């Protein structure tokens, strides 16, 4: 019952982990960190100076809680770690994911790691971005999206081809936030599949040369998706007149609330005194539609 | 019987004449008398191995349809031209004679001039009678008609008509209405009757000559060829009619039956008891094409081969072993009719393309398309001994190419034929064949049975030269954005494992990190990695076990996890054993995995102790 298992979990160093023990049993040595080899995450990084590190006792306590059976306790512990911003708060979460845990616990850990932005977690997040559970994958992708590190890009690009729409959407959003223009062709492919999760991200990063291919999709995809994409494009700084006017006119040909919303949002981004033709045209369309 | 006009022109309705009848009661003779049968067959003059029409031209009589309406046409295979076509309604197939070609038109028989198609005469079957079948010998025409219930109380007769006028020469009551249509050869008419008997009758005067008895099986057809007369049950085989088969048993030296694969529905001849089969039907498109070599009472299949026609596909089989010799796949349109002339397999497709195959090799030797876009509903070939050549004949594919074409044929109706072609293809060596089988795995629109058979064949053939092809296929990852699917990864893994293709290890291990990898594939990947001894994949295996050891998704079927654990034991060392020890004790691990890991570690403990760097004896999975 009080067995201690000396464990080298693909790390090249010993990690001591105890199974759950009954109350009153002798305390046993605790895990004292790990070193990555081969398959998973790096060792500890230097602490951030802004927040205090978790002490050894606190880490042990946290590990105990994360190793328990109470899912609510595990979730609360993970949440607390994520909000602590302690430089070594990611460590116990990564450890838990390295040795494996139930999906619900993994989701809580992934969510916390997203908040912590600790680069040591990139590799384990990459692994969990390939989990069979869509919810787990989505959380992992969202967590990866919080990093500016280029190491996350291949995984995000891969997940654009995920079978689950919300995973694809999470990857698309992350790539759009990064301004990852290389993702545009895959996002266009998704839009052709009528995947709404790709609409706004594509509009954010699509090169101007892709505009004809996007407008050709009218009639083949939902009007709302097309309007969303064009709505994002028209607001971009790198898209200037007269191209903006062309986009506004295209939006005018798309019926429905989404295109009206896109035009309203566009006008809203412009200064009051802006007299560009695209703004004038957009306002005219909005006014006409409001009279209908 | 209708009354007669005295003398009339030949081109007109010619009602049945009140001709002298053989009105004696049916006396078909004692069945199974070998001497009588031998005597009857000696009377039957062997026809020459050439077309029966008096010009000796190799002709095809085409039943045509389409916008121009029902017509009969005559095509010369040697000259590759349509000689004539005339409006004609055919309710029975055309039968060739010397100067006439005869066909049924409702309740009448119509004879047309061979050179022009012009009608010569029309003879109505008597009221209340059903025309069962007809045959032509030179210009003598014979038909069988019955009246009343086929099995109870009905009656039937064999009638001989003069070829020049259609007038009745004689009639013969058959004593039963359970009769089939006739065949005739060299002046002897054969009529199947009472399911098992074949009556031989003198074509000159209707006198009974002999009766053969099919002892072990019904006999529903009789066929006249230059080699001899054959009778039998269409789905079973054929007896050469001789004294030896006066009582036909399968052990007779004159019995023919080919060994054929399971997908073949053997049809040696259509059922002549069924009047509806007088006309062309689906049987013409799915049947055997065969000829015989005869030496006295002995018969064997000519060239020891038979051809199987299955709509668009022709197969040549060794009649004794059933081995495939050749295959031909006609693109797009099925054959409406085909025949074995003794020198060639000739056919015509429903859209009017005529073709010929060498019966020994299956090579296409002749091709010609009828002008005008006619629809061909059937054809009769008067081309005995002729082997057409010429036309726009493409270079034929190899056997593997022909079989591959059948597998890839877009027509979804022929799953059984495709499976057969796949099986035969898989028996052929060569990397190209392996590539073809791999391609089958990746095609979603092939019937599942075909894909499954390709999978088995790939694993079984162990083509080591094709390892790079497997690696390329394994490298394909499913991707929703591009529409690519990694199909049948479990099969690829199994095949790569069977080959011990180490270069496939890393690509296989990559799939362990992908969410699209199905459990069945994980299981095969783990086993394959063990077979390859791929210890460089241990990190991927460890990660997989870590990620899913506590995941309820594997509670119902933990086999993939157990396979991964097994791989860790067999490929790994002390590190992996410690990890598995943890898994076996940590309560969040699935129960089945804990038990298996405990068992595997215990079983291999001795080997691990003596060889710390590697696992020892192979563990036995707990049942």
Image: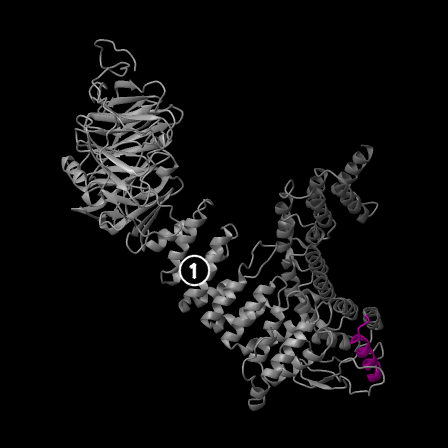
As rendered, which of B339 and B538 lies closer to the eye? B339
Task: Sort mark 1 into few (<14), some (14-19) or many (20+) by Cα contacts within 10 Å.
Answer: some
The residue that appears at 24% across and 51% down in the rendered structure is B304
Left or right placement of residue B544 versus residue A114 in this view: left
Residue A82: where, in percent of width, then height? 81, 70
Does the magenta run of residues contain A68? yes
Asked if B511 appears above or below B233 in the picture, the reply is below
Q: Quadrant of residue A127?
A: bottom right
Q: Which residue corresponds to mark 1?
A: B435
Does the magenta run of residues contain B98? no
Q: Quadrant of residue B481?
A: bottom right
As rendered, which of B453 and A50 lies closer to the eye? B453
As rendered, which of A34 and B586 lies closer to the eye? B586
Q: Which residues are magenta?
A: A53-70
Is label 1 in a helix, a strand or a loop? helix
Residue B388: where, in percent of width, then height? 23, 40
Residue lying at the far top in this picture: please name it: B6
Q: In what quadrant of the picture does the N terminus of chain A appear?
A: bottom right
Left or right placement of residue B163 versus residue B573 in this view: left
The residue that appears at 72% across and 44% down in the rendered structure is A224
């Amino acid at each position: 019952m009080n067995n201690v298992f000396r464990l080298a979990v693909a790390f090249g160093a010993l990690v001591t982990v105890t199974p759950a023990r009954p109350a009153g049993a002798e305390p046993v040595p605790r895990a004292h960190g790990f070193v990555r080899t081969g398959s998973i995450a790096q060792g500890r990084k230097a602490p951030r100076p802004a927040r205090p590190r978790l002490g050894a006792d606190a880490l042990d306590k946290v590990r105990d809680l994360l190793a328990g059976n109470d899912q609510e306790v595990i979730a609360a512990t993970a949440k607390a770690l994520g909000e602590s911003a302690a430089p070594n708060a990611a460590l116990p979460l990564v450890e838990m994911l390295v040795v494996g845990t139930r999906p619900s616990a993994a989701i809580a850990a992934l969510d916390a790691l997203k908040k912590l932005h600790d680069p040591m977690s990139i590799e384990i997040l990459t692994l969990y971005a390939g989990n069979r559970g869509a919810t787990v994958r989505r959380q992992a992708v969202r967590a990866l999206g919080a990093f500016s590190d280029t190491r996350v890009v291949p995984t995000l690009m891969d997940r654009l081809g995920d079978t689950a729409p919300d995973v694809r959407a999470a990857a698309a959003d992350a790539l759009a936030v990064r301004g990852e223009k290389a993702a545009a062709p895959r996002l266009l492919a998704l839009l052709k599949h009528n995947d709404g999760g790709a609409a706004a991200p594509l509009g954010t990063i699509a090169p101007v040369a892709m505009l004809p291919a996007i407008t050709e999709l009218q009639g083949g995809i939902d009007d709302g998706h097309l309007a969303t994409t064009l709505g994002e494009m028209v607001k971009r700084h790198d898209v200037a007149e007269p191209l903006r006017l062309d986009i506004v006119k295209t939006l005018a040909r798309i019926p429905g609330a989404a295109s009206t919303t896109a035009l309203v949002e566009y006008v809203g981004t412009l200064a009051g005194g802006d007299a560009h033709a695209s703004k004038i045209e957009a306002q005219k369309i909005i006014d006409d539609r409001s009279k209908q | 019987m209708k009354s007669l006009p005295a003398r009339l022109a030949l081109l007109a309705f010619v009602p049945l004449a009140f001709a002298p009848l053989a009105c004696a009661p049916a006396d078909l003779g004692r069945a199974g008398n070998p001497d009588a049968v031998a005597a009857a067959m000696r009377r039957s003059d062997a026809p020459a191995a050439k077309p029966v029409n008096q010009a000796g031209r190799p002709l095809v009589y085409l039943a045509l349809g389409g916008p121009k309406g029902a017509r009969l046409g005559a095509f010369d295979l040697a000259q590759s031209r349509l000689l004539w076509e005339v409006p004609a309604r055919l309710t029975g197939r055309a039968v060739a004679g010397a100067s006439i070609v005869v066909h049924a038109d409702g309740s009448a028989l119509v004879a047309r001039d061979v050179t022009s198609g012009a009608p010569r005469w029309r003879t109505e079957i008597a009221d209340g009678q059903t025309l069962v079948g007809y045959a032509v010998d030179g210009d003598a025409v014979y038909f069988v008609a019955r009246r009343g219930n086929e099995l109870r109380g009905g009656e039937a007769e064999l009638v001989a008509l003069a070829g020049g006028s259609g007038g009745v020469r004689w009639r013969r009551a058959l004593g039963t209405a359970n009769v089939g249509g006739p065949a005739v050869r060299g002046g002897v008419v054969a009529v199947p009757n009472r399911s098992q008997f074949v009556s031989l009758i003198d074509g000159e005067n209707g006198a009974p000559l002999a009766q053969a008895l099919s002892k072990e099986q019904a006999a529903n057809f009789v066929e006249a060829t230059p080699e001899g007369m054959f009778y039998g049950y269409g789905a079973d085989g054929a007896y050469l009619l001789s004294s030896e088969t006066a009582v036909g048993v399968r052990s007779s030296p004159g019995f023919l039956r080919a060994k054929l694969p399971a997908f073949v529905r053997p049809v040696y001849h259509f059922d002549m008891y069924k009047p509806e089969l007088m006309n062309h039907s689906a049987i013409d498109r799915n049947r055997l094409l065969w000829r015989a070599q005869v030496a006295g009472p002995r018969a064997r299949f000519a060239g020891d081969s038979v051809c199987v026609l299955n709509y668009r596909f022709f197969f040549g089989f060794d009649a004794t072993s059933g081995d495939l010799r050749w295959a031909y796949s006609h693109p797009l349109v099925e054959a409406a009719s085909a025949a074995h002339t003794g020198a060639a397999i000739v056919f015509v497709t429903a859209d009017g393309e005529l073709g010929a195959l060498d019966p020994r090799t299956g090579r296409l030797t002749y091709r010609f398309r009828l002008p005008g876009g006619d629809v061909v509903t059937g054809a009769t070939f008067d081309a005995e001994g002729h082997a057409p050549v010429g036309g726009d004949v493409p270079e034929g594919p190899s056997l593997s190419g022909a079989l591959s074409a059948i597998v890839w044929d877009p027509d979804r109706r022929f799953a059984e034929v495709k499976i057969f072609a796949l099986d035969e293809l898989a028996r052929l060596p060569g990397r190209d064949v392996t590539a073809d089988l791999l391609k089958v795995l990746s095609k979603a629109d092939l019937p599942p049975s075909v894909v499954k058979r390709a999978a088995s064949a790939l694993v079984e053939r162990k083509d080591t030269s094709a390892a790079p092809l497997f690696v390329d296929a394994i490298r394909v990852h499913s991707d929703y954005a591009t529409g690519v699917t990694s199909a049948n990864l479990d099969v690829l893994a199994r095949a790569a494992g069977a080959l011990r293709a180490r270069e496939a290890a890393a690509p296989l291990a990559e799939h362990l990190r992908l969410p699209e990898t199905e459990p069945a594939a994980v299981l095969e990947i783990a086993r394959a990695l063990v077979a390859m001894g791929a210890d460089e994949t241990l990190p991927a295996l460890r990660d997989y076990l870590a990620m899913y050891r506590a995941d309820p998704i594997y509670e119902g079927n933990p086999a993939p996890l157990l396979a991964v654990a097994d791989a860790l034991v067999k490929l790994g060392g002390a590190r992996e054993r410690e990890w598995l020890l943890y898994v076996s004790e940590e309560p969040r691990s699935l129960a089945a995995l804990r038990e298996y890991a405990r068992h595997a570690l215990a079983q291999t403990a001795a080997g691990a102790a003596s060889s710390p760097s590697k696992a020892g004896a192979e563990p036995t999975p707990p049942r």
